[in-house]
Image (tube, rainbow, N blue to C red):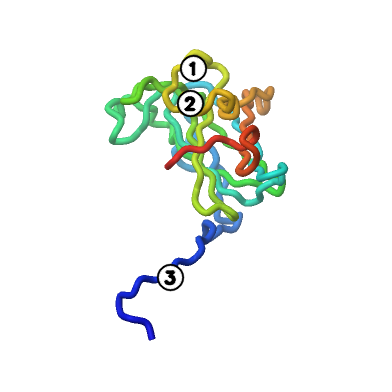
Amino acid sequence: MSRPNAPLAPTSQHTIGPFFPRTFFQPGDNDLTLVAHGAAPTRRGETILIRGRVTRAEGMPCLNQILEAWQADAEGRFNHPLDPERHLADPDFLGWGRAWTDEEGRYEFRTVIPGGYAEAGGRRAPHVNLTVMGAGLMRRVETTLFFPDFPAENAADPVLAQVPEARRARLVAVPEGLAEGLRVFRFDIRLRGDAEEETPFFEA
């Protein structure tokens, strides 16, 4: 018989859940340029596509991983109470979206090239924040995508500077031509692997 208020025995961690069927997601969920389904997309900034694959060790694709992206608008502003320039933020840009991976681990976001902005730690280069969650993960993981268009800004970014220099290139998206008349940037995410292959992740 157990004693009242006795410490509980430790148990193993569970992976993230519950998991949602593909019907949970709606067309346009991965489009950050829309504030709502059926709304006109933003007319500010350059619209782009971000595509990539989520894989684990040995390049095995990760099916049904959920990705969330959030970023500043084309001028580096957020429509959020903590942004002192919220009143100047793009009213037609949501800046948040959700995608999921298919059988090959592929995902896609439609968004705009974000602007940089200043914060307490220093000037931030244009970037997109990404989080990944799904089967096999004990908790969500977070990383940041930077753009090759801004080498000087990237070199001065205080977050990218925390990553060992040899691994920083893994956080810079790769230009991959055009699709639908838009520039495409490829950003693959390796959840597990050698240090040379695994995507750098940040503490939430």
Give the amino acid type for the residue marked by disc 1 in the picture: Ala
Secondary structure state at the residue bearing disc 3: loop
* Front residue of this view, candidates 106 and 37: 106
* Amino acid found under the numbered disc labelled 2: Leu
Q: Residue at x 63, y 25 (%)?
A: 174
What whole-number distance in Å separates the C-alpha atoms at marks 1 and 3?
A: 48 Å
Q: Position of residue 121 (x, y in %)?
A: 34, 25
**Disc 1 + disc 3, Cβ < 8 Å:** no
Q: Is residue 145 above or below residue 192?
A: above
- Looking at the figure, which quarter contains the C terminus? top left
Residue 4 visible (yes or no):
yes
The 10 Å Cα crowd at callout 2, few under 14, some 14 to 19, many 20 or more, is many
Position of residue 149 in the picture relative to residue 55 (left or right): left
Location of the N terminus by quadrant is bottom left
Residue 67: give x, y in percent of width and height: 54, 44
Disc 3: which residue:
9
- Alpha carbon separation for disc pair 2 and 3: 40 Å
Q: Residue at x 66, y 45 (%)?
A: 56
Label 1 sits on residue: 155
Q: Is residue 37 above or below residue 1?
A: above
Foreground of the two, 2 or 147: 2
Disc 1 element: helix
Circle nearer the viewer, 2 or 3: 3
